[in-house]
Image (cartoon, rainbow, N blue to C red):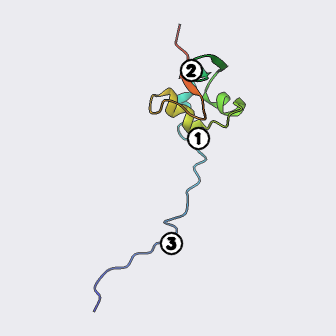
Amino acid sequence: MDNKKKISVEGVFERSDKGGKHRKWRHSGYAVLMYNFNGELEARYSDVDEAVEKNTVGATYTGIVNCVTGKVKKHAGKIWRKEAAV
């Protein structure tokens, strides 16, 4: 006799559609700089959203944010940094 309870797994493995916009407001208040591995500045973007839209190297929002917050050192073959406040 099997006394184990069974639960429904319907919908457990489906991805919820949050759209990826629930935390973007945190990273829109600073400019983003894109450097090559020689330390030369290649581009300046007004915020992370613009960097994602206009970069030509395939960088993603999460990758850029992880770079500028210091979680990783590089993303999409580039170095991404916050612009220092003046």
> Could you tell whether 7 is left or right of 10 in the image?
left
In the visual, does 78 lie left or right of 4? right
Q: In the displayed structure, does residue 78 sit left or right of residue 12?
A: right
Q: Which residue is mark 3?
A: 10
**Residue pictured at 55% horizontal, 56% vertical:** 16
Residue at the top extreme of this rendering: 86
Q: Residue furthest bottom?
A: 1
Task: Tell me which label, 1 or 3, sits earlier in the chain.
Answer: 3
Residue 34 in percent (x, y) is at 61, 23
Q: Is residue 31 or residue 36 the one in the foreground?
A: 36
Residue beneath the point at 69% across and 30% down? 55
Is 11 drawn above or below residue 76 in the view shown? Answer: below
Residue at which label 1 appears? 21
Between disc 3 and disc 2, whose residue precedes? 3
Q: Amino acid at mark 2?
A: Tyr
Residue in view at x 55 percent, y 58 percent: 15
Residue for badge 2: 30
Q: Tell me where residue 49 appears, x and y as whole percent.
A: 64, 31
Three-letter code for the amino acid on which mark 3 is drawn: Glu
Separation of disc 2 and disc 1 at Cα? 17 Å
- Tell which of 71 and 19 is nearer to you: 71
Q: CA distance from mark 1 to mark 3?
A: 26 Å
* Label 3: how many Cα within 10 Å (few below 14, some 14–19, many 20+): few
Circle 2 crowding by C-alpha within 10 Å: few under 14, some 14–19, many from 20: some
- Label 2, secondary structure: give it: loop
Please state which amino acid type lies under the numbered disc 1: Lys
- The image shows residue 17 at horizontal and vertical percentages of 59, 53
Q: Position of residue 57 (x, y in %)?
A: 68, 34
Q: Secondary structure at mark 3?
A: loop
Label whose residue precedes the other's in the sequence (2 or 1): 1
In-front residue for pair 26/73: 73
CA–CA distance between discs 3 and 2?
42 Å
